[in-house]
Image: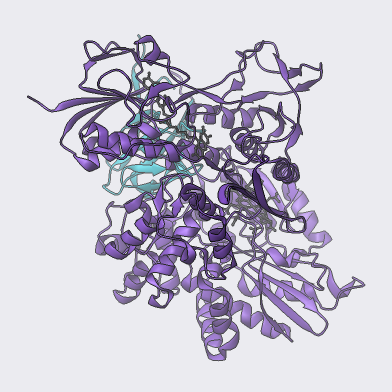
Chain colours: A cyan, B purple
Amino acid sequence: MENTLQRIKVATVNEVPKGIGKRVHAGNYEIALFHLADGNIRAVENRCPHKGGVLSEGIVSGNRVFCPMHDWKVDICSGKVEEAGGGCVQTFQVEVENGDVYLLLEDL
Amino acid sequence: MGREKLVLIGNGMAGVRCIDEIVRIDRGRFDITIFGSEPHPNYDRIQLSKVLQGDTSISDITLNDWSWYRDNNITLYTGETIIKVDPGRQVVYSDSGREIPYDHLIFATGSVPFILPIKGADKEGVTAFRDIKDCEQMMDYSLKYKKAAVIGGGLLGLEAARGLLNLGMDVDVVHLGDFLMERQLDRTAANMLKAELEKQGMNFLLEKQTAEILGDGRVEGLRFADGDEIPADLVVMAVGVKPNVQVAAESGIPVNRGIVVDDYMKTEITNVYAVGECAEHRGMVYGLVAPLYEQGKVLARTVCGLESEPYEGSVLFTKLKVSGVDVFSAGSIIEEEETKSIKAFNDWEGTYKKVLITEGKITGAVLFGDTTEGNQLLGLINQGADVSEYLHASREEESLVASMSKDELICGCNGVTKGAIVEAITSQGLTSVDEVKACTSASRSCGGCKPLVAQLIEHTVGESAQLPEHEPVCGCTSLSRDEVVEAIRDLNLSYTREVMNVLDWKTEEGCSTCRPALNYYLNMVHPVTYEDEKESRFVNERLHANIQKDGTYSVVPRMYGGVTDPAQLRKIADVAEKYDVPLVKVTGGQRIDLFGIKKEDLPNVWADLDMPSGYAYGKTLRTVKTCVGEQFCRFGTQDSISLGIALEKKLERISTPHKVKMAVSACPRNCAESGIKDLGIVGVEGAWELYAGGNGGTHLRAADLLCKVKTSEEVLEIAGAYIQFYRETAHYLERTSKWLERMKLETIRAVVVEDQAARAQLNERLDEALSVAKEPWKEVVESPALRKELYEHVSIPVLSK
Ligand code: SRM
Ligand SMILES: Cc1cc2nc3c(=O)[nH]c(=O)nc-3n(C[C@H](O)[C@H](O)[C@H](O)COP(=O)(O)OP(=O)(O)OC[C@H]3O[C@@H](n4cnc5c(N)ncnc54)[C@H](O)[C@@H]3O)c2cc1C
Ligand code: SF4
Ligand code: FES
């Protein structure tokens, strides 16, 4: 039962530009970090459920990102895909403290 | 008593369309419940062919989205199948244990694809072509495997085969008969079709009976009755469908080939109806949407207790949805003793027409190559019109829509007549195809009638009325491109969020369609002051490299006019080695592409190359191809290389609505392919000819002669004016080929060639925009901030516990 979450600093807030995703490699995880217009920072798995497109390169609108490969729409907060094909991406917890961005991850 | 309960089995095209008619008649009348085995809302099955061919995507073919069900208070169970009906107790049972009572029950269970009962048909890699799942499987296989075999040379088989070709597979089409589409075509048309499809890369095996599917678990090949074998990694069975009647039959509803219905779509069992491909009416089962929609209309009125005309059967017609091939067939097409025919066979242009006449009336037609008369003929067949009407109409030079009578069909799929569309246009002031689609459903299914609808709008509103273009920019707004650009100018709007706020966008931050478009329009209107919004750019243009399927990028440096030298080649070779570039390729645009470069390496690669960006990713000038020309070629009449280089240097880096390609050839042999470029130039003795609006891509279009001039200076000036005029008037993502057709060649010629003053002003505005364009690779190489913001990622190694 060693499934504790690790808290890892990945960036400072101003290193994550608004509206443009940042790719984070952490151990075995490949994560897309987004700084949304409302100021929140969110993290999702960086693989589109359709054909593995890199979500961190997509156009961000509100809390959705449009996959750069075939334009599927993914909700960054829930991880849900809004397309007919369906599916979802894993979301990760983010904490911001004193301008630093932390990810909470299981077993790296 | 509460509302009457209406249950629909089958969430497909015919059933949902019928429900749509019902809620239009009386929205509050029924408690409606729909069951569908597929996990999707109702989508346009017809478009699966286009999805497979890459012309549209699965997300774009939804007909009724989730909100439609919600808004009409319809309970929808997707991914849930009805397994039994008890017509005595009036209850349906689903596979997840649900029991729902009904007052009215509609079967719209469609068809099931027919799978040949041969050995190996259950192997992995054998699929039908019926639903989204099949389509996805084919797309998926095309990524992993190379060889596909399609069994069945009918409509569906050929559309599947074309799709698989587009997906990069080698395709064999296996057909039992000795010519293709024998139910819709005669031998002449079928042979023309076969020749055309062979040209497109299809391979045909006619008169072949498949006996066995080979392979060890997964498909590896086919064996035929004559003993021949072919290899295959994917087998698509497109040999026909059979009505899906199992549940009805097991529940005691009378079934023949389909569920038997009368002229009001009622079965023999009280309160039970059937519509669509599962229904059998007067011995006929229909497999095309047009008749199914007619049935749906009749059933809707019946269920609502209204009087309805009886459904009396339909004339069948077909169009093949394969790009580059126009085939139309309607009515009965088999020549018999008492039929006469009008035939026109033009071997030169590859067109063929056959109109069949029985007792002086038009009863069938086959068109190949040119199908513009298709809908008119269908109308005449439907009316049982006299042949003289057809001959009369075709002799008139008037436009086709003008000569059609009110009752003639424009949209065959949805049964919308010319009269109904004209009515909607005039009473509701419609001006765009999309509006007509929303109001009347015309062009809502296969889309083949869009050009006719557009002509009809033009004809009805009158060309002089100067049709305001009213295609909304995207779903986030109801405003058209022109309205948005006008607002940007008049209200002096200066960034995308402002545009969206002021113009009341429906979404807060737009979408992947409008954001890049607004970014372009703002830049076009305020070239000097506008600050490009990187976050509104598609990844390729944000990063100045083309993203690849695996997330790496490609790098194409400029090689002006396709000319290089040993030093440049050496430099490229060094970079390719240093960065372990997996693929170095000469492109179709006369330059070299380095594929598979990691994002974080891009700035270093550019620094080492020290060449300008070739903008192979941009909405801007891509390449200017040149032929060798008078410097070396014995036929060259002009210096094509120098002019090509001058054009490329003048226009590189200017942002345009879509990409722009050019070419310069030094004689009419046209080795640089100037006839299919956005602007193509051809040298002739003592002059240059300029060709505009060509396209060599998805929709091939030969360029039109714009003008002929004496000097290279004039070419450069007209090219500048042409590009600026395109920048100012085109819709974002509209190539010059479409733009030119919309604007008309004469208008463009009048502005950029004939009106000297306008030409000069356009060039001035172009120069203004060019004056601030920066070389993007150099900018990144020299800016540590940009490199960090856009090209670096965060990397955290595995932590030890
Ligand atoms: C590299 C190249 C193929 C090659 O290996 O030769 C190529 C590669 C791509 N083409 Fe192309 N096209 C290439 C020449 C062409 C040509 C031939 C030409 O330019 O003479 C055409 C037809 C001519 C034309 O455009 O009129 C062509 C018509 C297209 C189209 C269809 C455009 C249309 O209006 O129908 C697309 C799709 C699009 O732009 O939406 C496309 C899109 C693409 C994209 C960008 C697809 C994508 O979005 O990822 C490909 C990028 C590959 C990459 O990662 O670098 N490519 N493409 C050629 C690069 C030329 C260059 O040096 O810049
Ligand atoms: C690739 C392709 C291209 C085509 N091109 C054309 C064209 O160009 N022109 C044209 O006119 N037609 C075309 N067609 C045919 C057209 O799509 C069909 O005629 C039409 O979809 C039939 O409508 P339907 O509602 O009867 O059946 P469907 O659309 O098949 O709908 C039936 C639905 O009922 C569901 N269902 C079945 N049984 C149950 C059950 N027991 N419980 C719950 N749900 C159930 C099925 O899963 C299915 O979703 C094409 C078809 C295909 C596959
Ligand atoms: S390079 Fe062009 S033709 Fe080839 S697969 Fe890509 S888009 Fe299609
Ligand atoms: S991979 Fe994301 S949409 Fe296709």
Please identify the quadrant where the N terminus of chain B is shown: top left
Percent x, y for residue B708?
A: 71, 82
Q: Which residue is drawn at 39% across and 43% down?
A: A65
* Depth check, front residue: B372 or B498: B372
Instruction: Indicate left or right for B611 with B423 as reference.
Output: right
The number of numbered discs placed on residues in the rendered structure image is 0
Q: State whether residue B640 is above or below residue A27.
A: below
Where, by quadrant of the figure, is residue B457 drawn? Answer: bottom left
**Looking at the image, which residue sits at the far right?**
B634
Percent x, y for residue B691?
A: 67, 73
Please identify the quadrant where the C terminus of chain B is shown: top left
Residue B674 appears in view = yes
Q: Which residue is drawn at 52% across and 82% down?
A: B762
Q: State whether residue B158 is above or below residue B237.
A: below
Instruction: Indicate left or right for B413 with B209 as reference.
Output: left
Percent x, y for residue B225?
A: 77, 16
* Depth check, front residue: B410 or B54: B410
Percent x, y for residue B423?
A: 32, 60
Q: State whether residue B24 is above or below residue B502.
A: above
Residue A96 appears in view = no
* Depth check, front residue: B676 or B144: B676
Where, by quadrant of the figure, is residue A84 drawn? Answer: top left
Q: State whether residue B214 is above or below residue B700.
A: above
Instruction: Indicate left or right for B743 with A97 as reference.
Output: right
**Looking at the image, which residue sits at the far left?**
B1
